[in-house]
Image: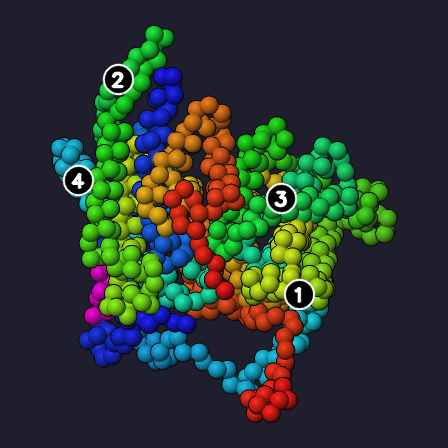
Amino acid sequence: MKTPSINTAKAPSGIPALLKTACFNALIALVLFSLMIGIRTEAGSDGQLTYWTRFGDLASIVAAVFGGSIVIELLRQWIGPTGAEKLVPPALQSGMSFVGRYLAPALLIFTLLVPVIFYDQRYILDLAILVLTYVMLGWGLNVVVGLAGLLDLGYVAFYAVGAYSYALLATNFGWSFWVCLPLAGILAAFWGVLLGFPVLRLRGDYLAIVTLAFGEIIRLVIINWQDLTGGPNGVSSIPRPSFFGIPLDNSDNGLAAKLGIEYSPTHRIVFLFYLILALALLTNWVTIRLRRLPIGRAWEALREDEVACRALGINTTTTKLTAFATGAMFGGFAGAFFATRQGFISPESFTFQESALVLAIVVLGGMGSQLGVALAALAMIGGFELFRGLENYRMLVFGMAMVLIMIWRPRGLIGHRAPTVYLTKAQAISSDLVKEGHG
Amino acid sequence: MDYFAQQLINGLVLGSIYGLIAIGYTMVYGIVGMINFAHGDIFMIGGFIALITFLLLISTGLTAIPVILLIVLLVSMAITALYGWTIERIAYRPLRHSFRLAPMLSAIGMSFVLTNYSQVAQGARVKPIPPLITGGYTLHESADGFVIQLSNIQIMVVVTTIVLLAIFTWLVSRTRLGRDMRACEQDQTMAALLGVNVDRTISMTFVIGAALAAVAGLMYLLYYGLVDFFMGFVAGIKAFTAAVLGGIGSLPGAMLGGLAIGLIETFWSAYFSVEYKDVAAFSILIVVLIFMPTGLLGRPEVEKV
């Protein structure tokens, strides 16, 4: 039900109204930015604050707001009233479903071939590994947010648990990556259950805030428990992964020597690429299988309506806990991979921004759509790379994008979150039949 | 005992600042039903604007501290309130009837925008100001030389908070705007049908919340003598904790919760460990939500099917 809104219906038409709106917006912008952008403060070497003016920047921003609001207003009048759902034409719809059917296999084949095509381009391989890490994180969080509908703002905590589990086990006990990987997943899942227990009764916004607090607690403990984690200095010289026990280096025991080929550092990168691809595909496969099991059905039911879920006798406790544990486990795997790839981890890698980024990927991907999450991760990380030169503006643009996406397509770009099972046809009980006693 | 009394004073001052921010959270949650995640950053923006206004006023050669303080207070309240209004207009109003998580995510995005906007606009370094209000009173001096200090800034923070709270309580309980706000809190559709301008009332809620956050920002600046672009995040979460602890939607509760969080944090730092003071505050949030989801003064939420 929509509450009657009173002010939104005023549609300005004509040039005077347009200019009036633009002038108003420019005036607001002038006041907003006057001090923050017009004046720049900086602490000098003696601790004394100095300032200088930047009225040129201020003027250009106000002019940009003025021009921008005219453009937006014109676009709005051209597209038509906002809020009206536009239907996709049927021809386009069938075309999209055709693309949709073949897009996933095509993407998978392309991904498998990436190391072959870009063998010489280290930068692209590194970027691809990064994208796949986020695809995996997105798929992991998708279990919690997309399937079970539990908004988790502290997902990075499990990523951190996985990374630190591997880093500490490997550096302190010398355990191999393949032993630590399952352990990292199990430990992260354990923390997932630990978080899950207290938040069982919470929902929606409260749940989000508690998971955020949990993520911050984990990060603060990592920073402050210096004996174990090295504090802000992090853990360094984490062992690189081996090809099931065979190291990927230039030694006589190395894989290159055993295969009789010439050693190249790219081997390790390619191996890492396939490793994260396999882990991500495992996540995807497990998620798809789980969706068809009763537990997956229960997650989706929980997302749609928790009260109805309880009324139908679904144990919401175990349903929520398994969702948290499953999501956390994949986060832990991804964390272990992150640690072995970087060789160095520190608490700086596990800030709230990371959680928000993964969450943005899931939301942008349409909350529940596996393909959507993969494409969203590609778009997000690719977009981040475009802004690499503008380090400071990156998060600014990211935040703006998040707001705009929410306003423009709150259900995500590709998204649909229809339950996996539903009644395709309503039961044929018309009022006539009921009257005659057939129903 | 003297140490305890000193920490009590410090905690109450810190708690007043948290309480002022918490009121913004609790008001918005009460009316719109969303967590205004960007509110902590509004507090930060308020601090920055106060800092810049100070700098400008001092460079004009004005020396009368009370005049400076008054102008800074009014300017930072006005501009920060406009920030609150704009953010509601841009990021929240289009989403008012969207699905439930959309405003929250939009607010997180807005929080990033504000944090990085002030980093880009004002640089990443901490901005200190020289102490403007100095002096204080020695309340008690114990035999071993420990002195209980009550500084003038501390008095000012507490007095300002009390005055603002009085004005604010009057506003909510006695004026037309306050009545509209309470009506919208109960039932927006019904309020609209009875002639309350819902959009305007919600805008005013954000404006008032932002103005109070600006006061908190100014107090923080005066009390700690510095601002930086990242201070909104942690302060925001703690103030939200305060709002939840007091019972979200309850205005006296927000102030009470703020004082409680301020005291807990101060005593934790004083008696246990400074490093884990944030952990303590966040743990309290979790514990409160589990065992007392309605907070100290909140009304239980009725679950409707």
- Judged left or right of residue A68, residue A275 is right
Separation of residues labelled 3 and 2 (CA atoms): 48 Å
Question: In this rendering, does residue A384 appear at all?
Answer: no
Say which residue label 2 marks. B138
Which callout, 3 or 1, points at the residue further toward the start of the chain?
3
Q: In the image, what residue occupies the spot 23% across and 34% down?
A: B159
Q: Nearer the viewer, mark 4 or mark 3?
A: 3
Q: Nearer the viewer, mark 4 or mark 1?
A: 1
Q: Which element carries disc 2, helix, strand or loop? A: strand
In magenta segment, residue A24: yes
Q: Camera-side residue: A240 or A209?
A: A209
Q: Position of residue B112 (x, y in %)?
A: 42, 52
Say which residue label 3 marks. A194
Q: Which element carries disc 4, helix, strand or loop? A: helix
Separation of residues labelled 4 and 3 (CA atoms): 50 Å
Q: Camera-side residue: A27 or B25?
A: B25
